[in-house]
Image (cartoon, helix red, strand yellow):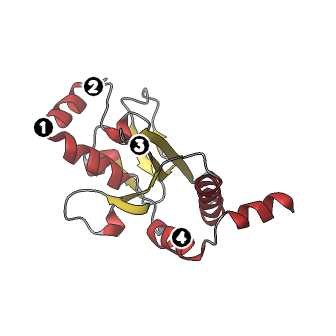
Amino acid sequence: MLDVVDVGPVGAAADQCGLMVKITTPCPATLMVLAFLVELRHHLLCKYSGDAIDFLVLTLSDERGGFTVVFAPIPQLMKLGTEHPDLATWVNPLTGESSEVVGLEETRIDFGKGVGHFLVAKPALRAQLLAGGEDTVRRIWAFNRVPGLRELVDGFIQNWRGPADAEAALLS
């Protein structure tokens, strides 16, 4: 099963949210799943320059014998200043927003932070998370949005013909 999920503050418009593709499968290493992910990644790297976006990809057990694959295109954030990354201000160059302006003490998404696990290096982040952890995580995903991504992903899904496309590309 394939689902495209907008992640952001409750009630936020889709274009103000981050996005993840969620694949539920009995085996994440099938040609179908791998070809889809590789081709989607290639499609997005061609549409946005290769240094503008990155990807968070997680595979998790569903505890019922299957797996959930999360594929989330995210921007390459820019650090401002010389502070340690955990203390710095970050900018999403695709939206022009800074962590300071949107009031986020942490904006980076990685394996831990993308699912709400934080190592807290500053008291202000601890206070922000304790005051509203789910809201903070949703706001971090919204900060990491890639403008125009939903349309590109939806278009790719609509036009994707399956792993035969991948096999043809590998053989050429």
- Closer to the chain start, of discs 2 and 4, is 2
Query: Residue 88 location, x and y as percent?
Result: 39, 34
Which three-letter amino acid code belongs to the residue tagged 2? Answer: Lys
Which three-letter amino acid code belongs to the residue tagged 4? Answer: Ile
User: Which residue of the protein is positioned furthest toward the right in this rendering?
Assistant: 172
Q: Nearer the viewer, residue 98 or 47?
A: 47
The relative height of residue 146 versus residue 126 in the rendered view (above or below) is below
Q: CA distance from mark 3 to mark 2?
A: 15 Å
User: Which residue of the protein is positioned furthest toward the front in this rendering?
Assistant: 65
Label 1's element?
helix
Q: CA distance from mark 2 to mark 1?
A: 15 Å
Q: Tell me whether circle 2 and circle 4 mark residues in contact (CB < 8 Å).
A: no
The residue pinned by badge 2 equals 122
The residue pinned by badge 4 equals 157
- Closer to the chain start, of discs 3 and 1, is 3
Q: Tell me whether circle 3 and circle 4 mark residues in contact (CB < 8 Å).
A: no
Q: CA distance from mark 2 to mark 4?
A: 41 Å
Label 4's element?
helix
Dot 1 crowding, Cα within 10 Å, few <14, some 14–19, many 20+:
few
Q: CA distance from mark 3 to mark 1?
A: 22 Å
Instruction: Choose mark 2 or mark 1, whichever is in front.
Output: 1
Q: Tell me whether circle 1 and circle 4 mark residues in contact (CB < 8 Å).
A: no
Residue located at (15% from left, 41% from top):
132
Q: Nearer the viewer, residue 69 or 45?
A: 69
Instruction: Choose mark 3 or mark 4, whichever is in front.
Output: 4
The answer to whether 125 appears left or right of 78 in the picture is left
